[in-house]
Amino acid sequence: MSASPGPDGTPAHVAIIMDGNGRWATERGLPRSAGHREGVEALRRTVRAAGGLGVRILTLYSFSTENWSRPQAEVRYLLELLRRFIRTDVAELHKSNVRVMIIGGRDGLETGLRAMFEEAEALTRGNTGLKLVIAFNYGSRQEIARAVRALAALVAEGRLAPAAITPELIAAELDTAGLADPDLLIRTGGEQRISNFLLWQCAYTEFVFMPEYWPEFDGQSLARAIGIFRGRDRRFGGLKAQTA
């Protein structure tokens, strides 16, 4: 279930599909790598802005399970950008009381990258400010399949009756267990789809699709999307506007 928005209607949990790095670069005659590099700067701007706007959870779709099919040179560059971000930014995020969480499959990832994820999470675990959730090697269908397999194993062991499986039990096995569902999902770059991102969690999420490419996104863009969210009538299947 979604958390209650703030008193001014600010969504508690914002999720973002950061789309358009490659198209931004191509339109400027630059290599795609330049778009990804500028995308990291947009990420930094957005994280800084989110806390100031009152967002409590910010989930960013950084690398999907399908992204492995991109050219290997591009994949290597994206992984190196992620490593650099963790090495250079996590200490600053820690000083700012940001908690870093990473969701997505870790099986098969190279050992050094997994260790970096674990160190970032351990360093910031006690922080009480913004929760920054990075979805890496993430695919929502794969996440749901992992959750179903975990519950199926309990059924096979005789520890869980099939009739006892509820939406709450499934949610507790997802990568986002313990986090409120997103109130607002933003996708940049003009596309209007969610690309295997948080399918279960977005059952009652408000979607805002924005034309600007991700490298152009900033605090004003985030504030504009939140303004659109505040104007929505959220009924959650009922007849009267509700907060959650």
Image: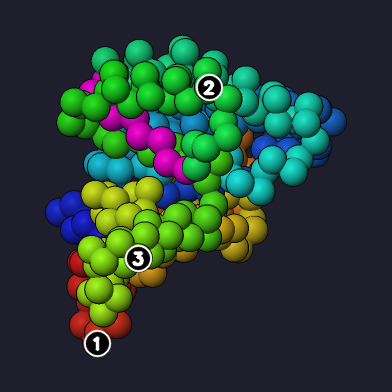
The image quadrant that residue 24 belongs to is top right
Magenta span contains residue 103: yes
Residue 237 magenta-drawn?
no
* Sequence-earlier tag: 1 or 2: 2
Dot 1 falls on a residue whose secondary structure is loop
- Residue found at x 52% / y 18%: 112
Q: Earlier in the sequence, mark 1 or mark 3?
A: 3
Q: Amino acid type of disc 1?
A: Leu
Specify the quadrant that holds the C terminus.
bottom left
Please provide percent x and percent y for residue 220.
Answer: 44, 40
Where 193 falls versus 73 (above or below)? below
**Which tag is nearer the camera, tag 3 or tag 2?**
3
Q: Give the SS element for disc 2.
A: helix
- Viewer-side residue, 169 vs 67: 169
Q: Which residues are magenta?
A: 96-104
- Furthest toward the right, the residue is 29
- From the image, tell me which residue sits under label 3: 156
Q: Label for residue 239? A: 1
The amino acid on which the numbered mark 2 sits, given as a three-letter code, is Thr
Q: How many residues crowd mark 3 within 10 Å: few (<14), some (14–19), many (20+)?
A: few
Q: CA distance from mark 3 to mark 2?
A: 32 Å
Which quadrant would residue 51 be assigned to in this image?
top left
Q: Is residue 84 above or below residue 191?
A: above
